[in-house]
Image: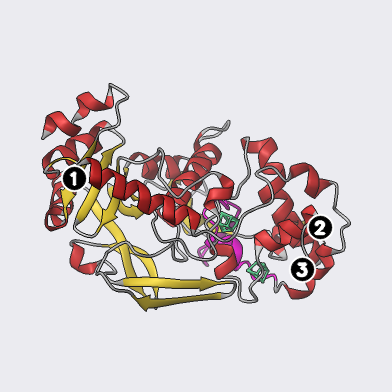
Amino acid sequence: MDAILGPECMNSNEKIQGWMPRERFDELFGALSALGYTCYGPQVRDHAIAYARITSSRELPRGVTDAQQPGSYRLTHTEGGRWFDWANGPQALKPLLFAPRESLWRVARDAQGRLSFTPAAERPAKIALIGARSCDLAALRLQDQHFLAGAYVDEAYAARRRNLLIVAVNCTRPASTCFCVSTGDGPRAASGFDIALTELADGFVAEAGSPVGGDILGTLVSGAASRVQVKDADEAIAQGAQQQVRSLPSRNLRDVLFDNLDHPRWDDVAARCLSCGNCTSVCPTCFCHRETEEPQLDGTASEHLREWDSCFTQGHSYIHGLTVRAATRERYRQWLTHKLGSWHDQYGRSGCVGCGRCIAWCPVGIDIVEEATALHGGGK
Ligand code: SF4
Ligand code: SF4
């Protein structure tokens, strides 16, 4: 089957879709393992779907789906026994590349008082992530822009990114909190994957997105997908798009937000917001962090740590004895005007990919779409 999905096809700009019968899916794990990859995939963990190490399809959340609402996430069972019949859980790809807590460097003092600095020399494992959704691929492009394309390349992120292989799965069952159609980021994975799959009842329509993805699929597909299989897959994705009930009023809200910095809606949302930072933790594009020193008590060494932070914390805007954004009103406004506004200046697009996580995982159910719509002039 190499001729169907092998590397030659990747050079021809020709999209060729193969058919992987359900009973051959487990061979994907073996093929990735043979290439030195540790597989991560979706599993049920603490009543939610999260990515964890995985060795076979038996660990996938078979026959499991989710019900998501503002401030609410529940897993339920579904008929049909599919493996990917759910929308994203709380965990994005972000923690695999931008670690929640990591050491950047260490410093040691010798007997003469001289200091020596050593960068953290992590050798990241080769990871194959199975089940990534299109919104998270869009978020990954934004994180790549932030960590890799600026004046300074983040070496820790870059090393992990080089070792990441992505098997995307197109979304056919969005949650009620999803709105990736309105941001232009889904539900079909358009780029940024090595392999993309669309699950049907008896197998997968498979597409290669890189030469290595083509090589892997070349050994797994039984042949080209039939017209009916491709049509069924396209219809399943289109139906998923039609099921989305939320949409942002515009892909570019920059001017609207900055023209309304004194809008009464900021007080309204501040009265509900707890400044807990859940929204920024689950958001696949948020990258704010703090750096701290962890010295040894005897003064001979210290470690420089980086941890995720949030624009909702008191310390995040603390400068020279002053907390610049002391009130929740200013913190929520900072988050929204950055995410949907000034990201356009920094990265050429909004910082929201429509995954809906901040809606489901906000403990008081604050809905970014509802807030943006209200500020845009169409809300309550
Ligand atoms: S702002 Fe909310 S919906 Fe948008 S990408 Fe972040 S978590 Fe997802
Ligand atoms: S919007 Fe919700 S999740 Fe975000 S800080 Fe406020 S209460 Fe927490």
Q: What element carries label 3?
A: helix
In the foreground, 128 or 262:
262
Real-space CA distance between mark 1 and mark 2, rounded to the nearest whole angstrom? 56 Å
Residue 334 % position (x, y): 74, 55
On the rendered structure, is 160 left or right of 352? left
Is residue 213 positioned above or below 58 on the image?
A: above
Q: Name the residue at 54% across, 44% down.
A: 184
Residue 230 % position (x, y): 27, 43
Q: What element carries label 1?
A: strand
Reading the image, the residue beneath label 3 is 269
Q: Name the residue at 11% across, 40% down.
A: 219
Quarter of the rendered structure image containing ligand 1 = bottom right
Q: What element carries label 2?
A: loop
Q: Residue 252 carries which label?
A: none
Q: Does the magenta stretch include residue 323?
A: no
Is residue 223 positioned above or below 77 on the image?
A: above
Q: Residues within 10 Å of mark 2 (few under 14, many from 20)?
A: some
Task: Say which quadrant the C terminus sits in.
Answer: bottom right
The label nearer to you, 2 versus 3, is 3
Q: Provide the residue span drawn in magenta.
A: 275-298
Q: Is residue 301 visible?
A: no
Reading the image, the residue beneath label 1 is 19
Q: How crowded is mark 1: few (under 14 residues within 10 Å), some or many (20 or more)?
A: many
Residue flagged by tag 1: what amino acid is it? Answer: Trp
